[in-house]
C-alpha cells in the first residue's frame, strides 16, 4: 500500500523558517519526480515546488522562488521543503505528491497537479504577522 506522510508543519512568525518532510512507503519513487503543493482555506490547491528523479532539476512557483528549496534523499525515500523567510500568505496545508510514472517525462519536475498520482494528507503551516 502506497503512502505519503508529511510532517514538519506548525505555527511560526513571519520571517522564520520551517522544514517539511514527506516520507514515501509501499514502493520506491526514486525514478519519478516529486512535488509540493499547498491549499489555503477557500482556495484551489496550488503548485509550490517540484524536483526531478535525481534532484538535478527543480522548479518553483514564482511566489516562493528564492525562499523555498526542495530536495530529496533516495536512501530515505523522502522529499523535503525548506521554507525560509516565511510570510503570512504562505499559510496553507502543504501536500507532497509523486509524479505519475506511466506517461510523459515522469522523471522531470512539473507544476501540473493532474500529472501526479499519489498524494499525502498534508501538514498545516501557519505564519503569523
Image (spheres, rainbow, N blue to C red):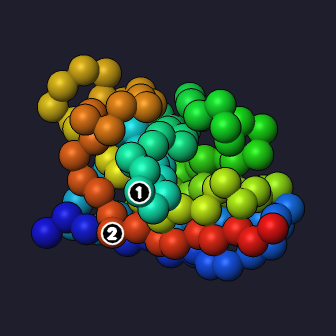
Report helix, strand or loop for mark 2. Answer: loop
Splitting the image into 4 quarters, where does residue 42 fall? bottom left
Label 2 or label 1, whichever comes before in sequence order: 1
Q: Is residue 28 visible?
A: no
So how many labels did they put on this image? 2
Q: Which mark is residue 42?
A: 1
C-alpha gap between disc 2 and disc 1 = 17 Å
Residue positioned 22% across, 46% down in the render: 117
Q: Residues within 10 Å of mark 1 (few under 14, many from 20)?
A: few
The quadrant of the picture occupied by the N terminus is bottom left
Q: Which mark is residue 121?
A: 2
Splitting the image into 4 quarters, where does residue 53 fall? top left
**Would you say 108 lies left or right of 89 here?**
left
Q: Nearer the viewer, residue 78 or 8?
A: 8
Residue positioned 66% across, 66% down in the render: 19
Q: Residue furthest toward the right? A: 15
User: Mark 2 or 1, which is nearer the eye?
Assistant: 1
Q: How crowded is mark 2: few (under 14 residues within 10 Å), some or many (20 or more)?
A: some
Residue positioned 60% across, 34% down in the render: 60
- Height in image: 38 above or below 91? above
Q: Which mark is residue 118?
A: none
Report helix, strand or loop for mark 1. Answer: loop
**Would you say 72 lies left or right of 27 here?**
right
Q: Nearer the viewer, residue 79 or 121?
A: 121
- Height in image: 126 above or below 107? below
Rendering coords of residue 64 (x, y %): 68, 41
The quadrant of the picture occupied by the C terminus is bottom right
Q: Can residue 39 be seen in this view?
A: yes
Residue positioned 75% across, 57% down in the render: 87
Amino acid at each position: 500500500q502506497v503512502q505519503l506522510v508529511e510532517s514538519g508543519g506548525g505555527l511560526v512568525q513571519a520571517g522564520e523558517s520551517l522544514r517539511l518532510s514527506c516520507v514515501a512507503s509501499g514502493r520506491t519513487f526514486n525514478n519519478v519526480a516529486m512535488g509540493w503543493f499547498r491549499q489555503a482555506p477557500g482556495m484551489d490547491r496550488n503548485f509550490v515546488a517540484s524536483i526531478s528523479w535525481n534532484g538535478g532539476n527543480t522548479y518553483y512557483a514564482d511566489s516562493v522562488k528564492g525562499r523555498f528549496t526542495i530536495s530529496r534523499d533516495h536512501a530515505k525515500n523522502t522529499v523535503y521543503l525548506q521554507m525560509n523567510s516565511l510570510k503570512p500568505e504562505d499559510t496553507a496545508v502543504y501536500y507532497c505528491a509523486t509524479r505519475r510514472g506511466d506517461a510523459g517525462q515522469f522523471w522531470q519536475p512539473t507544476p501540473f497537479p493532474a500529472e501526479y498520482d499519489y498524494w499525502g494528507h498534508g501538514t498545516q503551516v501557519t505564519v503569523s504577522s
